[in-house]
Image: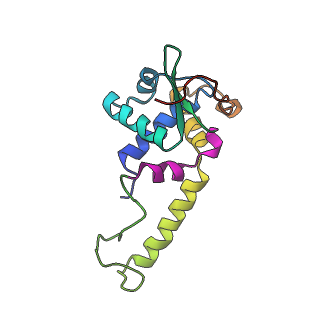
Amino acid sequence: MLCLPQTTGYAILALSSLAARPGQWVTTKSVVAWTRIPLPQLSKLLHQLLGSGFIRTKLGKQGGFQLSRPAHTISLLEVTQSIGDYDCFSGCLLGLETCSDARNCPAHTFWKAQKARIKQMLQELTLEDSTRFELKISHPLANHDSVTLAPPTSPSSESTTQ
């Protein structure tokens, strides 16, 4: 079964935890509580997301992390590609090393079309969609269609690097 790697899922969860609180500086401790991602793995992941430009950070007592762009402008494909630890869109469905358009396996045409569909779906799904889903799971009785995941506030004159 094809699925995205756990690190990609964790990245989407971590970003969703920030998107649920737009404009607020969210601590690592709060992200751990929201996502249940082990702290060492989350720290590494947040550093990677910072380097990819998805988040910004502010040092100090009132610091933390926040999205650098509105959640509705971040596609899940962007997040998937930024993690870079696994290219789920390459390779043969049957695991053959020499499968290509020139020398294809019996599943090649089917798999090529399905990979294109998956990429398109991930391009259309946004972090806002993921965040709404996570909010429905954590608060199933709330009306999440009316939740506004507003864009983050503009960076202040305080440090935004870590």
Q: In the visual, does 103 lie left or right of 115?
A: left
x and y, in percent, of residue 46 in the image: 43, 35
Residue 1 lies in quadrant: bottom left
Report the front residue among 86 and 56. 56
Q: In front: 145, or 141?
A: 145
Q: Which residue is rendered at x = 47% and y = 37% of the image?
A: 13
Q: Is residue 135 visible?
A: no
- Percent x, y of residue 57: 51, 28
Q: Residue at x 36, y 85 (%)?
A: 103
Q: Is residue 122 visible?
A: yes
The residue shown at (50%, 72%) is 113
Residue at the image point whose x is 54% and y is 64% from the top: 117
Magenta-span inclusion, residue 86: no
Relative vertical location of residue 35 with respect to residue 90 in this rendering, above or below: above
The magenta segment: 70-84
Of residues 70 and 2, the one drawn nearer to the viewer in this rendering? 70
Q: Position of residue 92 (x, y in %)?
A: 35, 71
**Magenta span: helix, strand or loop, mainly?**
helix
Residue 75 belongs to the span the image colors magenta: yes
Query: Total of numbered circles in the picture?
Result: 0
As displayed, is residue 149 above or below residue 99? above
State the image coordinates of residue 53 (x, y, percent, origin top left): 53, 42
> Viewed as shown, does residue 156 lie left or right of 66?
right
123 sits to left or right of 11: right
